[in-house]
Amino acid sequence: MRYAAIDLGTNTFDLLIVDYANDAWETCFQDKQWVRLGLDFYPDKVLTERAMQDAIDCLQGFKTVCLNYGVTQPKLIGTSALRDAFNNAQFIDRVRHVLQWEVEVISGAEEATIVFKGTTSLSTCPNQGLIMDIGGGSTELIHFSAQHITQALSLDIGVSRLLAQTDTNHALNANEIERIFAQFDQTLSVEFDKSVHLIGSSGPFETFYQLMYNRRLPKWSCLPLPMESLQALLDALITSSLDDRMILEHVPPFRKKYLHLAALQVKWVINTFNIKQVYASSVGLNEGIIELQKQSEM
């Protein structure tokens, strides 16, 4: 059986097409495009005409790929920017008119659940811990044990939101770092369980792996990162300037602007939840969307 999922994120649109047979996935096609649906989005939370047109252009390219693989109706999921946008109905109507595709906009709680399904689909994922999915508009934290969610939060601290509050051209100073940490603390509206393991869902965690090992994180994998080396990398990124990040190898160009803010979030989670081991996972929301598709057809 062939499945296709498209994650309509605040920064990127991700397409994944897979075949499922004999209880195993095989990737047919995977692509991530820097669309910037959240361009000039904060603080007004209105999708610009340019952002919507760039998004439609990207989806038209995705549709060509899908049709080449025999997929007519992929599952499109909208996350933080689309659920917050005052004019999201305008974009959804345009997708329906131009592409004959439907967009489902999900809540933060639903997003956390789907990320959990995707991340824990790997046999190498620990059987308990804290999953972290860093997005443009929101960051999801999912505490789980024995394949069950025990707590889940969707926090409005995505890297694009943070980027709109900072000067991207200079390195963060100590006062700014302290302010952002305090902002993170305020988003924790409930007492959250401590955890030994942190499982990073794709995105920046794949980049951390590449920077540490000079190679891509293997597909369909969840691998531990040496904590001492990871902490040193996070500290270097947090205090880096944009010029420093622009010359980094193995970092997608679109991620260089906000990688220091992603590192800051991970540093905060490690400290706040007393994390002893961090894992980088190559799967996340899109794989969770496909898991849901598969289950709905069983």
Image: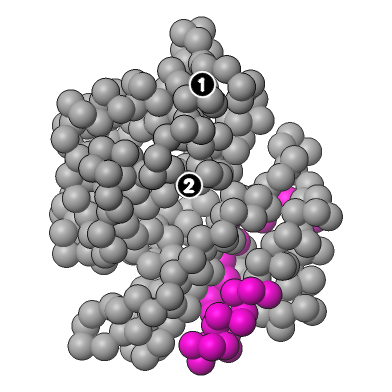
Q: Looking at the image, is 238 positioned above or below residue 127?
A: above
Q: Which residue is rendered at x = 47% and y = 78% of the image?
A: 4
Residue behind mark 2: 252
Q: Is residue 93 above or below residue 154?
A: below
Looking at this view, is 280 or 76 the one in front?
A: 280
Q: Which residue is mark 1?
A: 241
Q: Quadrant of the N terminus?
A: bottom left
- Give yes or no for contact between labels 2 and 1 (Cβ–Cβ under 8 Å): no
Give the x, y percent position of residue 247: 47, 32
Is disc 1 placed on a helix, strand or loop? Answer: loop
Q: Residues within 10 Å of mark 2 (few under 14, many from 20)?
A: some
- Disc 1 crowd rating (10 Å Cα; few below 14, some 14-19, many 20+) is some
63 relative to 186, above or below: below
Residue found 75% across the figure and 54% down from its top: 51
Q: Is residue 67 magenta?
A: yes
Residue stretch rendered in magenta on the structure: 60-88
Q: Which of 127/189 is in front? A: 127
Q: Is residue 254 left or right of residue 266?
A: right
x, y percentage for residue 289?
44, 70
